[in-house]
């Protein structure tokens, strides 16, 4: 590990990260930090490298070059359950719930990463295990209430509305007790009311729970409202980074991603977004 990685109060520091797939350079020489208790958004056109970058900073892919430090320790290549144990949880662009399990059970699966009962405990169920289970159940119910799914614990995941399924994914991720929560297009497919209410939830995750959140999101209204800082990728390169007001006014970003229509809307709205 080189000495020039300045951790400061950053939960994650990525330095000079690149990722090649054969001849394709998906991510190219990106420096990136995530301060603790921040909400950071990653935006960019399709194929810009956002998902690859997500997979790199969760340790699912090893970088072709560069270094990543998470919570003070270098991040090697990790299996999904090891990522969870390190304190990183995520939701997916295409919802991945256990559709034939109840909402409560889905959250308890997330919590399972934290439970201590081993095989012996699971079979013989000493009182220690039963009380651990009861606590997990209560906590799962609390998490469902927190994300706005009070009273829906017994419903099958597949019967929940689309917006509620997205909330359930967040509750399940919270069940793993993460330090960093990655949300991959959490408002995709939502109507404007659902998006607005999810934006508030993301804000509360940081304000109430002290979580650090990294967001991939295409809905610019959500991104501009909720982010402390936005990083823009294009063809695997970081082309801009800064607070929403700077990104909104950045000519290169407008040309590469936001588009002239967006610039026009902003001008017409006089910065309402
Ligand atoms: P989108 O918004 O469409 O999800 P993205 O910004 O997440 O796009 P990536 O999915 O990271 O972009 O893709 C970046 C580039 O890397 C693309 O050219 C893609 O085809 C390529 N790529 C991504 N994953 C792989 C892989 N496993 N093997 C080969 N090429 C890949």
Image: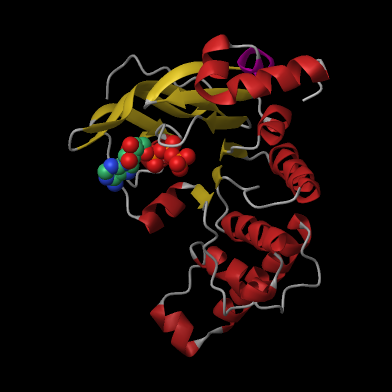
Vertically, is 173 above or below 201? below
Compare residues 224 and 141 and report the one nearer the observer.
Answer: 224
Vertically, is 132 above or below 51? below
Q: Is residue 21 magenta?
A: no
Q: In screen coordinates, is 147 left or right of 12?
A: right
Image point (43%, 26%), residue name? 13
Residue farthest toward the left in the current orientation of the protein: 22
Compare residues 40 and 192 and report the one nearer the observer.
Answer: 192
Q: In screen coordinates, is 126 left or right of 131?
A: left
Q: Position of residue 267 (x, y in %)?
A: 76, 14
Residue farthest toward the bottom in the current orientation of the protein: 124
Image point (33%, 54%), residue name? 79
In the picture, the quarter occupied by the N terminus is top left
**What secondary structure characterizes most of the magenta part?**
helix
Looking at the image, in which quadrant does ligand 1 appear?
top left
- Looking at the rendering, the stretch of residues picked out in magenta corresponds to 243-248
Q: Which image quadrant is residue 37 in? A: top right
Counting the numbered discs, the total is 0
Compare residues 244 and 4 and report the one nearer the observer.
Answer: 244
Task: Answer whether residue 77 is visible to the viewer in this image.
Answer: no
Q: Position of residue 84 (x, y in %)?
A: 45, 53
Task: Answer whether residue 96 is visible to the viewer in this image.
Answer: yes
Q: Position of residue 7 (x, y in %)?
A: 45, 22
Image point (67%, 66%), residue name? 140
Compare residues 271 and 74 and report the one nearer the observer.
Answer: 271
Q: Which image quadrant is residue 66 in? A: top left
Image point (59%, 22%), residue name? 259
Q: Position of residue 24 (x, y in %)?
A: 24, 33
């Amino acid at each position: 590990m080189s000495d020039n990685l300045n951790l400061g109060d950053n939960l994650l520091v990525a330095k000079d990260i690149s990722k090649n797939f054969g001849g394709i350079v998906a991510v190219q020489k990106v420096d990136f930090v995530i301060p603790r208790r921040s909400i950071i958004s990653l935006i960019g056109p399709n194929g810009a490298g956002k998902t690859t970058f997500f997979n790199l900073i969760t340790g699912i892919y090893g970088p072709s070059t560069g270094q990543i430090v998470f919570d003070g320790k270098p991040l090697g290549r990790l299996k999904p359950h090891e990522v969870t144990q390190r304190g990183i949880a995520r939701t997916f662009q295409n919802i991945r719930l256990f559709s034939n399990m109840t909402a409560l059970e889905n959250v308890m699966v997330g919590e399972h990463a934290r439970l201590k009962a081993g095989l012996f405990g699971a079979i013989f169920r000493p009182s220690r295990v039963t009380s651990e289970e009861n606590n997990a159940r209560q906590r799962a119910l609390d998490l469902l209430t927190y994300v706005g799914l009070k009273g829906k614990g017994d419903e099958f995941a597949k019967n929940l509305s689309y917006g509620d399924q997205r909330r359930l994914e967040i509750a399940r991720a919270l069940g793993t007790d993460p330090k960093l929560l990655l949300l991959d297009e959490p408002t995709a497919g939502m109507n404007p009311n659902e998006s607005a209410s999810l934006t508030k939830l993301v804000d509360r995750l940081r304000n109430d729970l002290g979580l650090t959140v990294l967001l991939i999101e295409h809905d610019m209204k959500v991104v501009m409202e909720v982010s402390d800082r936005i990083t823009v990728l294009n063809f695997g390169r970081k082309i801009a980074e800064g607070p929403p007001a700077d990104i909104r006014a950045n000519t290169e970003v407008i040309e590469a991603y936001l588009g002239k229509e967006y610039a026009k809307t902003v001008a017409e709205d006089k910065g309402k977004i």
